[in-house]
Image (tube, rainbow, N blue to C red):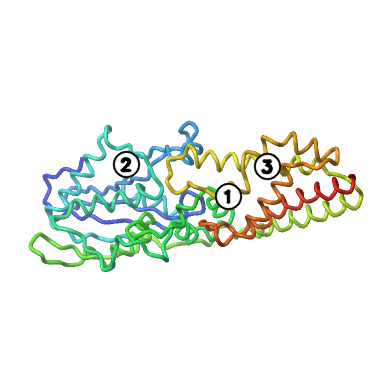
């Protein structure tokens, strides 16, 4: 593909790091490898982030960890133009490789691009568009890459959930949705090397890394750094004022007011319970499906199942029937106890929950207590 007959001293290989976008799948940026040969005019980008939304059941397969990505090759100018049009920066780090290492890396990339090799099972934390270029570069070096920090020891300040939060601040609904699906494993300390699934972390660690050859000599891994295009967010829409916390707090106030009115009037408001527990049950089914069926290791166990679970759907007919007739529901009594315990021991549960869960929990608690109060009055 790249005509290796050309003089090898005209060959340069770089790591490209691209800025965040507006969609949930590009909030964390992107990494790719540029291969340029001035003697032949070749200027390609090897991109491990190629996927298609047209793949059947793409969203479901992505959630279940069953998404296949592939290595693609693009012209460099086309690659940069695409990011420039999105207002996303492109940084280039020219790798300080020997001629032999360059050839080894390019040969490995070309082998990876063969039809039988280019497709791989994508994993968001462990095998993605940033970890693949890192591994390809490290394997091509005759020696080893030495990082300036301890890369393998888990760091208390680093967790997968924390890294996700770092880059989803401008997308509160995306952050909340991801938080619902991530289980307690996402809150365990991870190593600096594990954090390199984020392209910006990979760029930072490469910046100070050293390349040690077989004779023990070392020099910087990066020969030169360039800013190809800047980040431009001038045309991006302003963040929505309707954050999850504001919406759920407003919903709690409305539900609490309706519940107080219903208790005062002796009305059950069974339709409200039908809607709320149906939605909670659906959310529970989604979380349970991730825990049981997903190949993502960071989604199980998920202690949010104490609050949002499929049993709300299983007992929905029982709930509505009891509430409608102003009869005490043993299920709602048990639900109130579980929610109270959940809130009381929040800090002891080995999982960090999004704070937006509190008003949601209070909504279900208020409706459960309403049934207890009305049934007591009738008795």
> Considering depth in this image, is 100 or 360 the residue closer to the camera?
360
At 66% across and 44% down in the image, what residue appears?
Answer: 280
**x, y (%) of residue 76?**
31, 50
Which quadrant: the N terminus?
Answer: top left
> Considering depth in this image, is 312 or 73 the residue closer to the camera?
312
How far is mark 1 from mark 3, CA to CA? 15 Å
Report helix, strand or loop for mark 2: strand
- Image position of 158 with respect to 266: above or below: below
> Circle 2 sits on which residue?
71
2 and 1 marks in contact (CB < 8 Å) = no
> Considering depth in this image, is 364 or 348 the residue closer to the camera?
348
| Mark positioned earlier in the residue sequence (1 or 3) | 3
Give the foreground label among 1 and 3: 1
**x, y (%) of residue 327?**
83, 40
Quadrant in the picture for residue 116: top left
Report helix, strand or loop for mark 3: helix
> Circle 1 sits on which residue?
304
């Amino acid at each position: 593909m790249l005509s290796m007959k050309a003089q090898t001293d005209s060959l340069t290989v770089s790591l490209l790091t691209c800025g965040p976008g507006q969609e949930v799948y590009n909030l964390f940026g992107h990494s790719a490898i540029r291969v340029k040969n001035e003697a032949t005019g070749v200027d390609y980008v090897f991109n491990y982030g190629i996927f298609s939304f047209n793949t059947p059941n793409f969203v479901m397969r992505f959630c279940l960890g069953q998404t296949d990505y592939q290595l693609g090759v693009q012209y460099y100018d086309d690659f940069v133009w695409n990011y420039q049009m999105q207002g996303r920066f492109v940084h280039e780090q020219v790798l300080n490789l020997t001629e032999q290492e360059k050839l080894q890396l390019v040969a490995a990339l070309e082998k990876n691009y063969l039809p039988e090799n280019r497709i791989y099972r994508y994993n968001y934390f462990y095998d993605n568009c940033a970890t693949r270029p890192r591994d390809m570069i490290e394997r091509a070096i005759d020696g080893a890459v030495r990082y300036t920090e301890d890369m393998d020891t888990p760091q208390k300040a680093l967790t997968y959930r924390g890294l996700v939060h770092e880059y989803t601040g401008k997308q509160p609904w995306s952050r909340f949705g991801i938080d619902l699906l991530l289980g307690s494993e996402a809150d365990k300390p991870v190593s600096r090397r594990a954090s390199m699934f984020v392209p910006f972390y990979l760029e930072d660690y490469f910046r100070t890394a050293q390349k040690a050859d077989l004779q023990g000599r070392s020099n910087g891994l990066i020969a030169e750094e360039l800013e190809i295009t800047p980040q431009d967010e001038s045309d991006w829409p302003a963040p929505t004022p309707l954050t999850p916390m504001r919406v759920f707090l407003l919903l709690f106030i409305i539900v609490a007011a309706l519940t107080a009115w219903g208790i005062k009037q002796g009305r059950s408001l069974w339709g409200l319970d039908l809607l709320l527990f149906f939605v909670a049950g659906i959310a529970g089914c989604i979380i349970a499906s991730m825990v049981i069926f997903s190949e993502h290791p960071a989604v199980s166990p998920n202690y949010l199942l104490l609050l949002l679970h499929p049993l709300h759907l299983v007992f929905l007919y029982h709930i509505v029937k009891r509430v409608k007739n102003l009869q005490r529901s043993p299920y709602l009594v048990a639900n109130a106890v579980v929610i109270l315990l959940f809130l009381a021991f929040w800090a002891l549960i080995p999982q960090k929950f999004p704070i937006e869960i509190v008003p949601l929990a209070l909504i279900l608690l208020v409706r459960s207590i309403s049934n207890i109060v009305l049934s007591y009055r009738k008795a």
